[in-house]
Image (cartoon, helix red, strand yellow):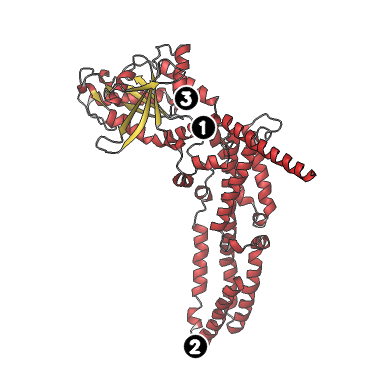
């Protein structure tokens, strides 16, 4: 293919140069190649290399904090690309060594202190990872490498030495051109310091892109394997997390509505916020299992005040705690509610300066998720309630432009939001928003739901959906183990019986 492509081009160059020389036009056109080569060289020098942003480390919406740390280990392997030679990048064994090294490092990261970090992995997890990596690499080769369907291992290895045979052909052409025009010697020298370097850089760039994609895909599925998300097999994983598979084969796991858990002190205004959200329709769906006081509401919320689009959500109203924090029973019920929540609304009294109980609750949430690194921590939105009591208390004339407050009341509300952010700054990695609302019993004392609370929920709805998806997937995999075990025993028993019968027939 390369010869059939190159021969006509070379013939055009030779005969074209001869024709230009015979007509006397060559002396007027000699500058075209050097100028283009020089511009190419300058462009290659000035064009910034940014491989890290174009081929980022693995990431997914369902990644936990632990998975994000593992992705940084993958990034380190990607950053080694500039130190790797083109010859290494065309060796199959080099990719196998990188795969083995990355596998070991990620296993040690997920299982620190283990003598053999691989021993805790299950056979289905390893088999699923191999299958998923092989499928993705197959698509990478077929889509990214021209002529890959005919590419042999020998030809792939020779790609690292491509400039050698290209140089031989080019030098032969240049030698012939010297005879036609001695000035071509100067052009030849200029091409060696310009276009040759660009060609080598392009070759290295192609190999580097392939290596970066390889490390990214391998690292991604090694993270999924070590996190335990492949224990249900490759099909269950793809049907849940793969977007294309989701479109082709709908999955009940993805149909689970987002659950919003409300926590806060007993006097913070949590119940009135529930009434505001539900429109005073106290439609309790059920009581959360394993609790006596966590009530669940199901409702449709609008994206904006004038939007016709609605989203199905479940609200979990947990028991309020005192100023000293939650007692043992309250902690148990609150944690049960939070474990079922995809977005958390922490309702805080906006006109009270004390935040000690709320800080204690956030610390408990942080500790619980730190002890469960396989789960994705839900985003927490802090809702400042009772903002009508913020001085001057007698003034209440909403709406307030809190981003550019003009009235004394609006400025004090904005200051309360800023002070709360500062007070809760240690939890900035999962407290994603602080908004203000007034949800009093009278309609004239209500403001901030459509303006602040619902837009904040919509901003972080995608993160909540990722939490819901991962949580539902984990529960589904764990809930199905008994039925799968019975099915495996049944299938295995049939196969053993069939083998025994065949053996008995053979004896006869």
Q: Is residue 376 left or right of residue 88?
A: left
Task: Determine whether the residue tagged by mark 1 lies in a helix, strand or loop.
Answer: helix
Q: Is residue 311 left or right of residue 195?
A: left
Q: Residue at x 52, y 88 (%)?
A: 22
Q: Tag 2 or tag 1, which sits nearer the N-term?
A: 2
Density class for disc 2 (Cα within 10 Å; few <14, some 14-19, many ≥20) is: few
* Location of the C terminus (image quadrant): top right
Up/down of 70 relative to 135, above or below: above
Task: Tell me if label 3 and label 2 are in contact, CB under 8 Å.
Answer: no
**Direction front: furthest residue:** 508
Density class for disc 3 (Cα within 10 Å; few <14, some 14-19, many ≥20) is: some
Residue 401 x, y percent position in the rendering:
25, 31
Up/down of 378 relative to 263, above or below: below
Residue 23's label in the rendered image is 2
Task: Determine whether the residue tagged by mark 3 lies in a helix, strand or loop.
Answer: helix
Q: Name the foreground residue: 271 vs 254.
A: 254
Q: Which residue is mark 1?
A: 476
Residue 200 shows in this picture: no
Residue 137's label in the rendered image is none
Up/down of 423 relative to 203, above or below: above
Q: Which residue is mark 3?
A: 339
Q: Is residue 447 left or right of residue 152?
A: left
In whole angstroms, how far apart are the C-alphas of marks 1 and 2?
80 Å
Residue 276 x, y percent position in the rendering:
28, 24
**Direction right: furthest residue:** 507
Q: Quadrant of residue 309?
A: top left
Task: Tell us which disc is closer to us: 1 or 2.
Answer: 1
Residue 180 x, y percent position in the rendering:
59, 84
Residue 142 shows in this picture: yes
Q: Tag 2 or tag 3, which sits nearer the N-term?
A: 2
Q: Residue at x 36, y 21 (%)?
A: 347
């Amino acid at each position: 293919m390369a010869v059939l492509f190159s021969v006509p081009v070379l013939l055009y160059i030779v005969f074209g140069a001869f024709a230009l020389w015979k007509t006397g036009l060559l002396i007027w056109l000699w500058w075209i190649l050097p100028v283009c080569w020089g511009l190419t060289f300058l462009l290659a020098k000035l064009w910034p290399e940014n491989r890290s942003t174009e081929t980022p480390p693995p990431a997914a919406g369902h990644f936990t904090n632990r998975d994000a740390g593992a992705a940084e280990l993958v990034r380190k392997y990607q950053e080694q690309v500039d130190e790797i030679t083109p010859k290494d990048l065309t060796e199959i064994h080099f990719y196998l060594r990188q795969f083995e090294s990355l596998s070991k490092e990620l296993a040690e990261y997920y299982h620190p202190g283990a003598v053999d970090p691989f021993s805790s992995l299950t056979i289905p997890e390893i088999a699923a990872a191999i299958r998923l990596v092989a499928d993705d690499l197959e698509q990478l080769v077929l889509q990214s490498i021209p002529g890959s369907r005919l590419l042999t291992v020998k030809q792939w290895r020779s790609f690292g030495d491509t400039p050698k045979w290209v140089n031989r052909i080019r030098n032969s052409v240049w030698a012939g051109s010297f005879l036609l025009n001695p000035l071509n010697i100067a052009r030849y020298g200029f091409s060696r310091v310009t276009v040759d370097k660009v060609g080598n850089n392009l070759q290295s760039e192609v190999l580097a892109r392939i290596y970066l994609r390889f490390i990214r895909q391998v690292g991604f599925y090694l993270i999924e394997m070590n996190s335990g998300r492949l224990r249900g097999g490759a099909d269950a994983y793809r049907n849940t997390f793969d977007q294309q598979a989701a479109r082709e084969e709908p999955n009940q796991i993805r149909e689970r509505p987002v659950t919003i858990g409300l926590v806060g002190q007993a006097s913070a205004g949590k119940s009135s916020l529930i009434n505001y959200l539900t429109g005073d329709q106290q439609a309790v769906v059920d009581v959360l299992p394993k609790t006596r006081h966590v009530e669940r509401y199901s409702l449709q919320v609008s994206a904006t005040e004038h939007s016709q689009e609605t989203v199905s959500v479940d609200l979990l109203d947990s028991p309020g705690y005192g100023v000293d924090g939650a007692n043992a029973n309250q902690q148990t019920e609150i944690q049960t509610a939070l474990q079922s929540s995809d977005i958390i609304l922490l309702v805080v009294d906006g006109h009270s300066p004390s935040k000690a109980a709320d800080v204690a609750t956030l610390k408990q949430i942080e500790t619980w998720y730190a002890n469960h690194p396989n789960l994705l921590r839900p985003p927490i939105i802090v809702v400042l309630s009772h903002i009508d009591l913020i001085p001057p208390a007698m003034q209440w004339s909403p709406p307030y432009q809190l981003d550019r407050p003009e009235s004394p009341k609006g400025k004090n509300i904005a200051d309360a939001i800023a002070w709360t952010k500062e007070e809760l700054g240690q939890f900035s990695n999962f407290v994603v928003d602080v908004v203000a609302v007034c949800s009093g019993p009278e309609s004239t004392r209500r403001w901030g739901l459509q303006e602040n609370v619902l837009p904040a929920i919509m901003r972080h709805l995608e993160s909540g959906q990722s939490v819901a998806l991962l949580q539902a997937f984990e529960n589904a995999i764990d809930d199905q183990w008994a039925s799968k075990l019975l099915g495996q025993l049944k299938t295995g028993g049939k196969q053993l019986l069939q083998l025994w019968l065949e053996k008995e027939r053979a004896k006869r």
